[in-house]
Image: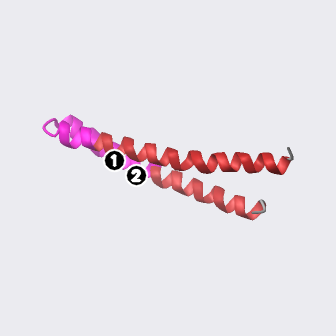
Amino acid sequence: MKYADLIQEVIDFINVVIPAMFALLFLYFIWKMFDSWILHAGDPVKVQEGKMFAVTAVIVVVVAVSVWGIVAIIRTSFLPS
């Protein structure tokens, strides 16, 4: 196996793992919002925690997408397709 083949295998693996991580992150976000704002809607502490989680989740998603974009730019700049 050549070095280029190994690098391509790693890139292919990452291209599968990152979207799966985004999907799991999205499902977790939906569950926490459902838990905080629907199941425990009468509890002001839980509702406040849900608001804090929502803000944190949006920041995490923006950072994750940004990092993924930077990695894609670096990959296309330095590695042949």
Answer whether residue 48 is visible to the viewer in this image.
no
Helix, strand or loop: magenta stretch: helix
Front in this rendered view, residue 32 or 4: 4
Category of crowding for the residue at label 1, using alpha-carbon neighbours closer than 10 angstroms: few (below 14), some (14–19), many (at least 20):
some
Counting from the top left corner in percent of width and height, residue 72 is at 64, 59
Category of crowding for the residue at label 2, using alpha-carbon neighbours closer than 10 angstroms: few (below 14), some (14–19), many (at least 20):
few
SS of the residue at dot 2? helix
Instruction: Give amino acid for label 1.
Output: Ala
Counting from the top left corner in percent of width and height, residue 62 is at 47, 55
Cα distance between the residues tagged 1 and 2? 6 Å
- The region drawn magenta spans 34-60
Counting from the top left corner in percent of width and height, residue 58 is at 40, 52
Identify the residue at image location x=75%, y=51%.
Answer: 8
Instruction: Give amino acid for label 2.
Output: Val
36 vs 29, left or right, is left
As drawn, 66 above or below 28: below
Identify the residue at image location x=52%, y=55%.
Answer: 65
Counting from the top left corner in percent of width and height, residue 41 is at 16, 40
The mark found on residue 54 in the picture is 1
Q: Are marks 1 and 2 in contact (CB under 8 Å)?
A: yes
The mark found on residue 58 in the picture is 2
Residue situated furthest right in the rendering: 2
